[in-house]
Image (cartoon, rainbow, N blue to C red):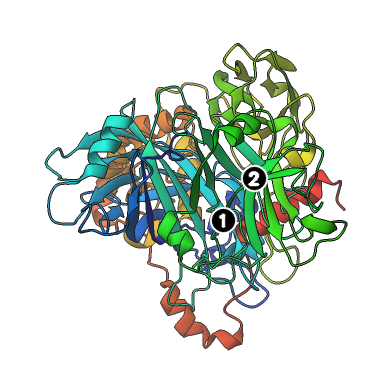
Amino acid sequence: MSYLHPVRLAFAGLFQADMSTVNNDVRHYDNASFEPVFQDLQKGPSWNGWWNPNGSGAFRFVGCKVTAVWYGDGTSTSDPAEDPVVGMTITGADARTAGKLVDIDPQWQLASAPWGLKVRLTDGNGPDVFSGSYLPNAFRDLWFSRGPAKGGDGAASSTFQSVIEGLSWNAGVDSRFARELQATTTADALSIRMATFGYVDDITDPMFTLGTMIGCIGPYLEGEPTSFVRGRRFVPAGPFTSWNGMTYFSGHVDTASSTLLLDLSNAFAITDRMGTPNDIGDATIGILRDPMLTENMPVSSATFLAIADVPYKDPNWLARTGGVFATPLTAEQLQLAADHPLALVTKAPVNPGVTGDDLGTGLVAIREAADGLLIEAEPAVHRIDAPGTSSVAFIASRYGVPLANATVTLTQTGKVEGQGGGQTSGPNTPTAPIPDMGVPTEAFVFPPTTTTDDTGVAIVQIEGKDPGNPRGYIDGQVYLMDFRVEGMTNPTRQPFDFVVVHIRDAVEPNPNPTWDDVGPILTQYGNLYPLMDSQIVNLRDPVSVAANKDVLELVFNLDPSDSNYMPVTRDLSAGKRDLILRWLANVPDTVEAAAPRRAAAAQARPSPAAQLEQAGPAADGIHVDVDSKQVFADNFLRALRGGR
């Protein structure tokens, strides 16, 4: 199934996510109450602009190298003398700016996606083996307790799965792997999965804005989902992790090659930034003969058919394999797995409740979802200019096989309070109110149920009516849709697994906009991106905007998937963009005449390094333990529990 395929490569290295953090607090969107201090680095009890106010938004590969390749016959190599692809670099664009990491809205920070990201396999000298563009898909399976000690963003981990589309190939590379990969894919695309963890958000650390990345690339097969594996889904009994600290992960039974493949890149807790897995004992993957066995229950030879031991304890295993474990299946195993749940079992010298010959067989560490049920939505993130529509596919399976004629229940979460804020007291606390999410509910329209077809897919049209600017100082509204098939309990699906929709306010056409029409829009972006002020243009000043109108017309006219598109947040409606472009095309004479006499940008703000120097040593309180997504996730889960 896509990258979970006998033909695949693994890579490992670092990534950079240099996002601006001024927009992590939704209250910073309020032009009326915005203060310049919100663009400063956090200090002491004041969160200010959080931990990276001058971020560029860039998302890039850093030093990612191919560690091994696998072939269709199940063999592999990690020796560049056997296949020159080994040791090559997975990198981004070489002739344009880096991709950007984009959230859909400050009130939903759990759907970050790379936009404008190029993916290339190259030796750095000759032509690329292949290159293409990452289709923007948001991360999945985000959890905050994977890493050691610190917690928050630094301990977080997630996976990005998508396709590399618009491929170009270099037929001159003498690589068996490259030939098999190109011959195996059935579409003009490849499947890619990146797992990211060990992120550093401490500006005093030399690794600031960097983290660890391991990845896998394989063929993309026509008709597959692009953002998830339609296969075997392992789920913990708790809301995020199992009793021994494992989280959600996917597997695939490849019947053509009688191979079981598991993606464990994001499954185990780790003990360091580089991804050394936490030792939970010897681990065996197998099949539950007794489907009623649950997590932390003992197994025996009568209730569990072992397949293979998983060598996860090797500290280099994640990097060398990309986190993918593959093992052949016997005819008996293949037949039993077709309608019985898979399970990962940990073995200990003595297990409770087991005696005789089966003493020490093991305990269920994590298992496949009940009845092998899986349902996911694609795309899971939608941007709708009201009034408008979009389509979402609900894709259901049982034990990896399409689930036909299944009823899918669809519901709104409704009003959710207090999302996307920050500090609640102390100096420089924003004064703007935090808007409610999810209201008015009547602006988000979809049927209450749908039914899957013979392929296990149900296509639903969702409608966005004009929400009427319910959030005041920020455009439109954010809505969440829950979806599930009968028999699915809450832990069966990851807690952040929703269809997320930003419905933007309707915009009246205006053939002759003035600065009063476009100024508030541009001012908001100027407030949120201090880097723009210091290096390009002061968006609050019509004269500065007019002086830079040529470059602004260029970037506002780009496709949103372009890495140079403005705004980096991708949250500008088409109606408001048209207003800005019409104003730029007809800049008033008084503004244009004044432009040459004014500086093209506002006075530069001090760099983060300068702010550190001015503020004194870190011991004086320059760094506050503010973890962006952890703060948001905690607030969201608290709201769903009714404030508890």
Q: Is residue 256 left or right of residue 354?
A: left
The circle on residue 310 is 1
Up/down of 638 relative to 584, above or below: below
Outermost residue on the front side: it is 357
User: In front: 297, or 299?
Assistant: 299
Q: Report the residue at 47% width, 62% height from top.
A: 317
User: In front: 625, or 304?
Assistant: 304
Amino acid type, residue under disc 1 in the picture: Val
Q: Report the residue at 52% width, 22% height from top.
A: 508
Amino acid type, residue under disc 2 in the picture: Gly
Q: Position of residue 130 (x, y in %)?
A: 24, 41
> How far apart are the alpha carbons under marks 2 and 1?
10 Å
N-terminal of the two: label 2 or label 1? 2
Residue at which label 2 appears: 286
Q: Position of residue 278 (x, y in %)?
A: 62, 67
Q: Is residue 365 left or right of residue 333?
A: right
Q: Position of residue 47 (x, y in %)?
A: 63, 68
Q: Residues within 10 Å of mark 1 (few under 14, many from 20)?
A: some
Q: Quadrant of residue 474?
A: top right
Q: Report the residue at 54% width, 37% height from top.
A: 330
Q: Quadrant of residue 485?
A: top right
Q: Quick check: can you spot residue 468?
A: yes
Q: Position of residue 574 (x, y in %)?
A: 45, 28
